Image: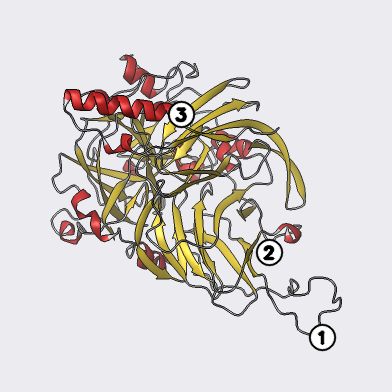
Amino acid sequence: MEAFNYSVKSWWWCCLLGFCILFASAASFPVPETLVAEGETHYHEFVVQATPVKRLCKTHTKITVNGQFPGPTLEVRNGDTLVVKVVNRARYNVTIHWHGVRQLRTAWADGPSFITQCPIQPGGSYTYRFTIEGQEGTLWWHAHSSWLRATVYGALVIKPRAGTSYPFATPKREFPILLGEWWTSNPIDVINQALRAGAAPNVSDAFTINGQPGDLYNCSRKDTVIFPVNSGETNLLRIINSAMNQELFFTIANHRLTVVGIDASYTKQLATSVIMLGPGQTTDILITTNQPAGRYYMAARAYATAPNVPFDNTTTTAILEYQSIPCPATKSRSKSKSKSKCTSSQPVFPFIPAYNDTQTVTAFTTSLRSPANIRAKVPTKVDVSLFFTVGLGLNPCNPGRTCQGPNGTNFTASMNNVSFVLPSTLSVLQAFYRGVNGVFTTNFPPFPPTQFDYTGNVSRALWTPTRGTETYRLKFGSTVQLVLQGTNIFAAENHPIHLHGHDFFILAEGFGNYNPRTDPAKFNFVDPPLRNTVGVPVGGWAVIRFVADNPGAWLMHCHFDSHLTWGLAMVFLVDNGVGELETLEPPPADLPRC
Ligand code: C2O
């Protein structure tokens, strides 16, 4: 199935702009900056379909987009509009989420199943339309229903706005690098079976780089991904953690990584030998090919923080290959074949931190900084102050069932002791927009209903959360401070918490219980990193601030899909503000029905 992908200069955009300017001068209010730039519109068709894919010696039918795994890379500029028609030819319900895209006034295009839309049913289709506004760097897209995102994902590359360039020398080459997680069986069966049993889902069989496990796995060597480079270049690598349930270290043998962006926001340049990404996070790095011409492994493997919890401890690799590798004279048997390149040489293997090396992770995440000009943007006055616990829980087994969670229980997870339940008759956003009662409550607690020693020895009486579709309502424009506090319930763990529709500043992070008297002294108001996903330290906390400037229903959740499935989520409802530019657009006519 060939996709039709093309872009048109939007002449009508100019007309709209002209109209706005006329209208603006007549009504004398300023034209918003976002309408001034002229963007292109890119049209794509995504056909979600079953496709045979062979990995680790076995062919399985996986759900893909356009038969590609990973799915197509979308490339746009800041200011461009994307129109993606998603056609569902698979046997599962599906939605696509544009991870990290602000979706200003277009919450209908955000994608999480039963939050902003009912899923696209088999045979159905839905067209996502949205504009990239003020974001540059790397984001990605993925399925947002059940566990389909295990194979339904791809990169979203956002180049600088037309007529502008990077805040660093233009790289010679650019490579999107998607880190994934592979199950030999059907990922949907993996989660459904785990839910039936109440147990943790089986860990994956491999990690992948751009869909390939690499040299260290069975039957994979001939398909290892190779990134060709020449000596003396500076290249941009756009790393995306699209794994389901695993935070990952990423490193390249003998090459320094210079971080220049995270989650589609630029950073101060940060030199390091290794980076860590939670699922959902992206990191743009520059590498200079200043090493002896040769072959160098890049590798990713787990950063695993929950004690005594099984994880996939395998290592995925790809090869950075200088195109002028000299072949040792004795080994070059055929002169005619590949004169300048010696691809038989064994790549150099990098040092990767230990699976539980929290010290390295902390040193890295706390060194990330926004560029210096960010200060004015960090909200200093707080309208709404929130404190959410994030962690696991255990539910008792229903009589007559056998549950395979710890001590015969069921695994669950919650925020502020509420385990989130997806609606099934209408999405939260539709119910909010139309004022339909009975789909959700606005009772999500701003503080934990019971205060306890979150990172101490937590009483068993506090291990079982309540259940509900609970949301927290925010006035348009309110500034929100949110303390995310990890708990020790069952197992402390670093949780990658993702907020839809907003970027947030990470003011501080730490271990143990957040202390409201002493910890605010550690807040960085000068150059805190701006992200859409924060790793809440294992047995610790993180403080974020954001402005609720985007009307809609916005899911916030742990980006480990197992935890999301267990209910580690909540929804912010953001009201409309004043006037059209602060008001959610009406729903598209083809919005799927439940
Ligand atoms: Cu990347 Cu709610 O997701």
Image location (x, y in percent) of residue 351: 54, 73
Q: Along the polypeptide, which appears first: circle 3 or circle 2?
A: 3
* Numbered circle sitting on residue 330: 1
* Number of the front mark, 3 or 2: 3
Q: Amino acid at mark 3?
A: Arg
| Badge 2 element | loop
Which residue in the rendered view is the most extreme toward the bottom? 330
> Where residue 333 sits in the image (x, y, percent)?
86, 78
Mark 3–mark 2 Cα distance, whole angstroms, equals: 41 Å
| Residue 423 visible within the image | yes
Q: Which residue is mark 2?
A: 216
Q: Between residue 295 and residue 446, name the one nearer to us.
A: 295
Q: Are marks 3 and 2 in contact (CB under 8 Å)?
A: no
Amino acid type, mark 1? Thr
Quarter of the rendering containing residue 310: bottom right
Amino acid type at circle 2 is Leu
**Which residue is drawn at the image coordinates 76% and 44% (left, top)?**
59
Question: Quick one: label 1, few (<14), some, or many (20+) residues within 10 Å?
Answer: few
In terms of image quadrants, where is residue 131? top left
- Mark 3 lies on residue: 129
